[in-house]
Structures are given as structure tokens and as C-alpha cells.
């Protein structure tokens, strides 16, 4: 784990219970690694901005895990449901056709962007060698 629960709770927040933190933190690291892989190993050196980004991403992951549990593991997939006059409609943030995993990556990107954009970790190298910083989100999301 790149970020300890102690760092999270003392520096960032207390939304995630300690028992749930390792799972949320691991998923957060995986997505941040995916978003930044082109620039090397973001976790090779200790950096407080990166740690804060992991904390932000872990909170997003925890929120979506909690919502999925509350909605019967259907956090982003069900828009409405009807059974003998009983109707349920879940609020979704995703667009039609967008998977729950794609929505989660997008939300994590939005959460970590404030910490990682100034560091250069979110920059991309495109065909022709053009180097720019994504301002509208990760183009592969």
C-alpha cells in the first residue's frame, strides 16, 4: 500500500472506515497507475501530492462500493425497476452505454486531477511527439 490508513485519517479524511480502506486504496492505486503509466511508475517515490490523490481516489472507490452494496450491486446499471406496482429508480451519473467501471475511472480522474495535473503525471505523448496535458479528462476513458 502506498498510503497508510494513518496518513489518510490524519491528513485527508475519515469517510472510509479502517477495515474498508485497504480495498479502496488498492483500487485507487490501480486506476491512478492506469492513468499515469505512460510517464513511468508514479509510486516509485514517496510524494505527498500522489498520496493525497490516492486518498481522493480511494474515497471515490469507497463511495461507489457503498452505493453498489446499498443498491444490490447495481449502483450504475439500473435506471428503473417495476414489480407488481412497486417501482424503484436509481439515480445514475453515467451515460447510456457507459459501464460502471468507465464511470468509476472518470470519477477517479476528476478527483485526482487537482493533485496530479500540476505534477505532470497526467500529461500524454501523442503520435508525432506532441506533448500536452489532458484538460477534458483521459482520452482513453
Image (cartoon, helix red, strand yellow):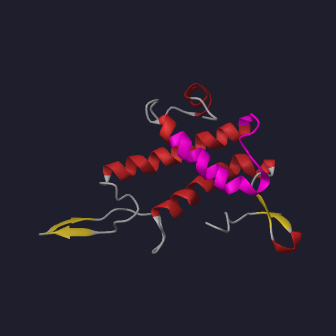
Residue ID at (46%, 74%): 97
Residue ID at (54%, 46%): 27
Relative vertical location of residue 71 with respect to residue 42 in this rendering, above or below: below
33 or 47, which lies in front?
A: 33
The span picked out in magenta is 24-48
Residue 43 placement (x, y as % from top left):
71, 41
Task: State left or right for residue 96 relative to residue 120.
Answer: left
Q: Name the residue at the left extreme.
A: 84
Q: Is residue 105 something one can see in this rendering?
A: yes
> Quadrant of residue 80 in the image?
bottom left
5 or 110, which lies in front?
A: 5
Does the magenta-highlighted stretch encompass residue 34?
yes
Residue 33 placement (x, y as % from top left):
66, 50
Query: Quarter of the image containing the C terminus?
Result: bottom right
Relative vertical location of residue 74 with respect to residue 20 in this rendering, above or below: below
123 or 113, which lies in front?
A: 123
Query: Quarter of the image containing the N terminus?
Result: top right
Residue 47 placement (x, y as % from top left):
75, 36
Q: How many marks?
A: 0
* Chief SS of the magenta region: helix
Task: State left or right for residue 92 relative to residue 6.
Answer: left
Q: Name the residue at the right extreme.
A: 129
Residue ID at (67%, 37%): 51
Residue ID at (44%, 32%): 17
> Quadrant of residue 42 in the image?
top right
Residue 104 placement (x, y as % from top left):
52, 57
Q: Is residue 15 something one can see in this rendering?
A: no
Does the magenta-highlighted stretch encompass residue 42?
yes
Amino acid at each position: 500500500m502506498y498510503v497508510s490508513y494513518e496518513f489518510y485519517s490524519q491528513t485527508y479524511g475519515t469517510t472510509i472506515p479502517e477495515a474498508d480502506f485497504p480495498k479502496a486504496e488498492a483500487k485507487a492505486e490501480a486506476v491512478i497507475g492506469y492513468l499515469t503509466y505512460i510517464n513511468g511508475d508514479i509510486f516509485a517515490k514517496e510524494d505527498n501530492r500522489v498520496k493525497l490523490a490516492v486518498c481522493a481516489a480511494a474515497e471515490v472507490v469507497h463511495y461507489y462500493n457503498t452505493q453498489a452494496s446499498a443498491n444490490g450491486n447495481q449502483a450504475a446499471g439500473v435506471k428503473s425497476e417495476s414489480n407488481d406496482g412497486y417501482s424503484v429508480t436509481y439515480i445514475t451519473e453515467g451515460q447510456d452505454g457507459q459501464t460502471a467501471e468507465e464511470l468509476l475511472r472518470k470519477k477517479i480522474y476528476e478527483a485526482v486531477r487537482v493533485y496530479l495535473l500540476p505534477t505532470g503525471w497526467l500529461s500524454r505523448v501523442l503520435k508525432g511527439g506532441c506533448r500536452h496535458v489532458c484538460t477534458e479528462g483521459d482520452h482513453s476513458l
